[in-house]
Image (cartoon, rainbow, N blue to C red):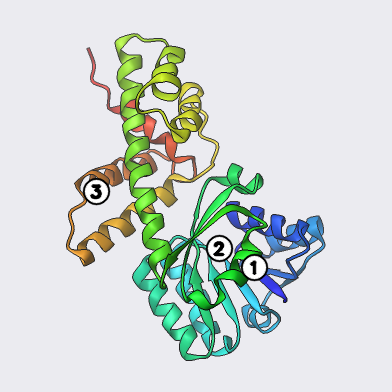
Amino acid sequence: MRIGLAGLGVMGYRIAGNLAKAGKLDIVYNRTLSKAEQFSKEYGVKHVTDPKELIKSVDLLITMLADDNSVSSFLMPLAPYAKDKIIVDMSTISPSVSISIANEVMKNGGIMYDAPVIGTSIFAEQKKLTVLLGGPESHVSTVTEVLKETASTILYMGKNGMGLYAKLVNNLMVGVYVAALAEAYNFGISAGLKPEDVHKVLALYGSAKSPTSELKVPKMMTSDYSTQFATKHMRKDLEIITKEAQNLHVINPLSSLALQFYKFAEALGYSESDYVSVLEVYKKANLSK
């Protein structure tokens, strides 16, 4: 089986690297050519400049792109070439958009899976990602065999779109949680607690500790906003959640409020920074005594 990957961003580059090291990647594509050239030089994997050449050259195509428009504009023109192909989209996009693309792929004789991931770039480097898979049950084992080279856990969620809904469930919780962590951290520091003591409560011994607080509170302590998951991506995911909640006729007051805080963080210049930079919103908003 020949395998290709499109999208060599923060996550895509690491996922592609894992596949290349396992000998399971034959060809890559990236819109910014220099990144594809860099990957080819590092891993000895061929790169192409034409998406049509990419899909024609492979049996299974993995995509890891930024948003609804990126995925739709990339995959829709390739749908006519999807006969007997498996497309695995690991992007986090709107389930409704993904389902539309999957239907178009299926009309042309191909199969598509939504396969968003849980985990940061560090998890990708350690091959400890969790993949949430949505699509036909028929080829789950084939897809799993490929993705196990970059993920420690692969969960089949059901039909097309279900992987993405599951990812949004996760990111709703994480987006609200990290905003709450920032609020709690800012509250504690403002009260006069030492950063290391706030860390003990939030990340080590408190009742709300979690792997996320263990990872993010140390970054808050040092204002380390080096990107593991960008603020712009969290904002985008919360916007998707708000849109999908409207489609499902359910309320999402907490994630809607958290969305505003990530928008504020972007307005402060932290769009490309890690989303833990939402802490800066609280710092800037502190009232004068």
Compared with 121, 33 (above or below) is below
> Quick one: quadrant of the C terminus?
top left
In this view, the residue in front, 287 or 8, is 8
- Would you call the spot at circle 1 few (<14 residues within 10 Å), some (14-19), or many (20 or more)? many
* Amino acid at circle 2: Met
Q: Position of residue 88 (x, y in %)?
A: 55, 70
Residue in view at x 50 percent, y 28 percent: 219
Q: CA distance from mark 2 to mark 3?
A: 26 Å
- Give the residue number, with chain letter if any, for mark 3: 256
Compared with 136, 214 (above or below) is above
- Would you call the spot at circle 2 few (<14 residues within 10 Å), some (14-19), or many (20 or more)? many
> Quick one: quadrant of the N terminus?
bottom right
Residue in view at x 44 percent, y 30 percent: 213
Q: Earlier in the sequence, mark 1 or mark 3?
A: 1
Say what secondary structure mark 3 lies in. Answer: helix
* Amino acid at circle 3: Ser
The label on residue 64 is 2
